[in-house]
């Protein structure tokens, strides 16, 4: 199917003005973000559930008819997406649920869900003849763009505050990206990245500006539905900072409803950190989004002003979901509980899904027999120091069997030391 | 197929004595390691290539008829194995090859190929009624056993030198395993782990003792063959420390040859660090394996005495392969080249594959038109400090567009600053 057949254009999510092609500044003249809009009746005539059943492609490119680009990239064997959906009885028991699933997006090439957005963004750029992509980030988005730009032989320029942790800046350079360390805070890095990309007509992979990125993230919703054999979960918990991921998840389910492939939307729950609650505040006060002074250990959802906040609020409201906040301490406890019950070591922001779900069950915001999916959006391996806060190394034992036995006696059941 | 139908027993790779069931000490009375031996004619009557083609299971469990256990575990949705095989034209060009593939085992749940061994080992233990698994390790094996034991609701006990890097000990505890930090060196930790597991009849997940672990690792060979549509690569480069991985790769191809599904073995190349060359020494001198004082940045292949050395030497010799050593500096350069050409951030030991391949091409040990697979056995995210050794952070720029332009002018081609 040709892109002009499936794509109707771009529509402002606030004033609803439509643009036939993506505007130069990516956003609406009114300043709000855009939605990619599709010609669903036409797509439904060319794309069928059975196409998915017979597809050998396990990556996001199996959904090409629902993506805003003409072609799959030349090479897709790095496999972005196609991550496991894991049912955990242990964690379900501990939380007090009957059916709990974890969508493990730590398994993407750069270790986070952001790879879905970078993959589609790079192809979108490429089809516009743009081979240099620019972003401001120190976190998962930077690593993701750098990694996939290397794979697709594109150039990535990453703007970051010079004060960012050296380990994070290392990862960007490790992938061969060009790093611009800016002697200022994140907002300046963001502004400069956008000014620079506009001036030189380079592609902006900045969340909340570029509507194509949500389109990549929505593939996680498609996969969840396929992996549950087209049963729709009752509730999905999504770690939420700028709002782009939950906006993408909403869009994925919205697409499938428009195609008539599913008939309901799961309740989408935004989990925010108490230290970064801009969307929570807006929903609680039924007021416009105001910036906050964000401070939380969950760096991937630490956001002063959520640039995709409107999409997040729409996702929550239209799906009958809600927003919930969790403390850093709850996040770190949930991180430990997640790894020790399921084997998945997730970053603090992802553990927020777990913490938010626990809290929602405790306060009867969801039911025990609801089927629940938690999005695990990024690996904990990028941030060992946070995990260490809840870990106490035991006192060492001397190198003889007697000492080992008394050390283990109190710790392990199931063997006798007689 | 019942396990007694497919499995003939365990055979010493040195004195060739056979054992009908796995001996209590896991190894032969002569002190050498065992091979799992199969009844290939019987397997060939029940298991066909077409079974693989129609299998929906993407994990190692698609190969159950060739694994030394009765059943798949109750839950397999965490998906061990099924990792991408990625062709890289960029890296091939840079090395001077025509066809180069990367088997990206960083994508396993705990970030390394070791998950294949842990997965089969845990099921093997379980079928023997053992639910506590013991290992000595500070690296990938420890994280892998801890992670998958959590998933399968088993208990893992990890012995490690108390002096191991706190970040590595953290990961073990993060997964809820019981850590025994021993006030001594690795060899004592290993000895105690084995004595303790023997005394209490606990399962030993120690490489080079337990022959079942190679059987898990061999699944990487099966996947490579399937992903290449049953074309056999000419050469496979394998980072080699204790020799268990290359032994497993050999066994995988050996199985397929015995079944008549393929007709040749690829040349298997063991890549060792110059600072940990026990297997290289034995091959060069055509002598028994002697321990070395190992010292290399590539911790996952840093081994004093390779406990699966004989299997490694057999794999190299029988496949017409060879052993090659690389320096730490070559490893770190290769690590950077790998990530910046392919988007895969691998640990130093995995980058040794890349460095070894470059060296083999330069010295005409393999041909330019050989099809080559490099095993990428573990993620670089567990060891950021090593990567930082080759990375220089650029001097920051001030937060204005002019300074950004002059910073980028020399670094980026493809835009004008006029």
Image (spheres, coloured by chain):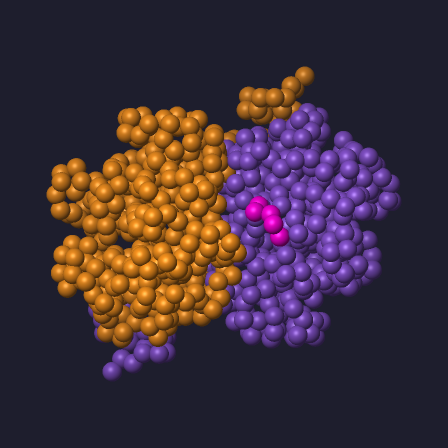
Chain colours: A purple, B orange
Q: Position of residue B38 (x, y in %)?
A: 29, 59
Residue at left 37%, top 78%? A413
Q: Give the extent of the magenta segment.
A: A53-57
Query: Does A54 appear in magenta?
Result: yes
Identify the residue at image location x=64%, y=66%: A372
The quadrant holding residue B15 is bottom left
In the image, taking residue A310 as reference, residue A135 lies left or right, namely: left
Closer to the camera, B55 or A271?
Answer: B55
The residue under the point 37% across, 38% down is: B233
Q: Quick check: can you spot residue B408? A: yes
Instruction: Residue B317 in the image: state x and y as whole percent.
Output: 22, 41
Q: Nearer the viewer, residue B277 or A123?
A: A123
The image position of residue B61, as x and y in percent, is: 44, 59
Direction front: furthest residue: B45
Asked if one can make out residue B179 in the rendered structure from this viewpoint, the answer is no
Measured as percent of width and height from the top left, residue B263 is found at 33, 42
């Amino acid at each position: 199917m040709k892109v002009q057949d499936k794509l109707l254009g771009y529509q402002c999510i606030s004033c609803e003005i439509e643009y036939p092609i993506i505007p130069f500044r990516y956003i609406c003249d009114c300043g709000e973000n855009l939605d990619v809009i599709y010609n669903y009746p036409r797509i439904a005539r060319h794309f069928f559930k059975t196409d998915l059943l017979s597809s050998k492609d396990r990556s996001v490119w199996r959904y090409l008819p629902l993506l805003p680009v003409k072609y799959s990239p030349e090479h897709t064997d790095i496999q972005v997406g196609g991550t496991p959906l894991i049912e955990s009885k242990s964690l379900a028991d501990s939380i007090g649920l009957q059916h709990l699933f974890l969508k493990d997006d730590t398994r993407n090439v750069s270790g986070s869900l952001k790879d879905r957005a970078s993959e589609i963004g790079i192809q979108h750029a490429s089809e516009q003849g743009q081979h240099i992509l620019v972003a401001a980030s120190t976190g998962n988005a930077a690593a993701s763009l750098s990694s996939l730009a290397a794979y697709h032989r594109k150039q990535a320029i990453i703007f970051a505050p010079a004060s960012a942790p050296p380990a994070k800046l290392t990862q960007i350079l490790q992938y061969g990206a060009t790093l611009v360390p800016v002697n200022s805070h994140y907002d300046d890095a963001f502004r400069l990245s956008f000014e620079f990309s506009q001036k030189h007509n380079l592609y902006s992979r900045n969340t909340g500006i570029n509507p194509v990125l949500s389109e990549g993230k929505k593939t996680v919703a498609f996969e969840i539905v396929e992996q549950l054999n087209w049963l729709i979960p009752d509730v999905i918990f999504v770690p939420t900072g700028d709002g782009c991921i939950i906006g993408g998840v909403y869009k994925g389910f919205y697409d499938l409803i428009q195609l008539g492939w599913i008939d309901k939307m799961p309740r989408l729950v935004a989990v925010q950190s108490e230290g970064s609650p801009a969307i929570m505040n807006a929903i609680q006060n039924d007021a416009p989004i105001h910036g906050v002074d964000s401070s939380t250990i969950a760096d991937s959802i630490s956001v002063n002003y959520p640039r995709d906040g409107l999409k997040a609020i729409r996702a929550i409201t239209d799906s009958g979901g809600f927003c919930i906040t969790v403390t850093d301490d709850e996040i770190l406890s949930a991180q430990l509980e997640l790894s020790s019950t399921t084997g998945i070591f997730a970053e603090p922001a992802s553990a927020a899904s777990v913490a938010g779900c626990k809290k929602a069950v405790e306060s009867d915001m969801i039911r025990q027999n609801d089927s629940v999916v938690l999005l695990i959006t990024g690996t904990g391996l990028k941030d060992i120091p946070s995990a260490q806060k809840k870990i106490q190394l035991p006192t060492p034992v001397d190198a003889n069997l007697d000492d080992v036995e008394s050390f283990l006696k109190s710790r392990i059941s199931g063997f006798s030391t007689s």
